[in-house]
Amino acid sequence: MTLRRTPMKRTPWPRPAAPESSWTAEREERLATRAAAAMTAAKPRHAVMARPPAVIRAIPKTLPQRSEPYLRLVAALPCAHCGLHGHSQAAHANKGKAKGGKTDDRTCFPLCADRPGVLGCHTRFDQYKLFPRELAARRADEWGHDTRQHIESQGLWPVNLPKWRP
């Protein structure tokens, strides 16, 4: 025996029309009254304005370089912190990141990934469990420099990627 589901029947009676309310007009009136009261209670204040320089020049924004071949080269190196082979990832420095953005790929360095039961150096570095913030920034600069030098010395630098010049 199979049970059939029947859709609910609607009533033959029409739905009642929404009552005409004047709440929007009342609301607008209340807001206008409140704004008028705020304007009469406002006191003039002294403002200090800085005089802008005569010429304002826009600072050109340099977009960070992206290179998948370079990231793969970095990930092939042993971990910069513990020296573990075969589990590295290309780690970006934590300074200079924007929301949802990363720093230039040429500043990457290898750190080991998480493994079953082990928190890797990459995660611990990003969470500042390896070093405090100031020391982590210095280490990221050192590791990035060492990684670039190692890849250049091996002659593996990607052809389409410009050299890093800070």
Image (tube, rainbow, N blue to C red):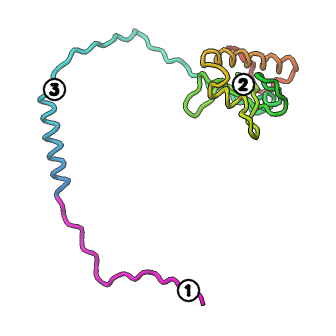
Q: Is-magenta flag for residue 51?
A: no
Q: Calculate the distance from the C-alpha at mark 2 to the C-alpha at mark 3.
A: 54 Å
- For label 1, the residue is 3
Residue at image position (76%, 38%) is: 115
- For label 3, the residue is 42
The dot on residue 155 is: none
Going from N to C along the chain, the mark reached first, 3 or 1, is 1
Q: Is-magenta flag for residue 7?
A: yes
Q: Crowding at label 2, few (<14), some or many (≥20) Cα neighbours within 10 Å? A: many
Q: Nearer the viewer, residue 1 or 149?
A: 1
- For label 2, the residue is 108
Residue 156, quarter of picture = top right
Q: Is residue 40 left or right of residue 79?
A: left
Residue at image position (18%, 47%) is: 28
Residue at image position (79%, 27%) is: 74
Residue at image position (74%, 34%) is: 113
Q: Is residue 18 left or right of residue 162?
A: left
Q: What is the span of residues highlighted in magenta in the rendered image?
A: 1-21
Counting from the top left corner in percent of width and height, residue 147 is at 78, 20
Residue 145, quarter of picture = top right
The kind of secondary structure the magenta stretch mainly shows is loop
Task: State yes or no: discs 2 and 3 in contact (Cβ < 8 Å).
Answer: no
**SS at mark 1 in the image:** loop
Going from N to C along the chain, the mark reached first, 1 or 2, is 1
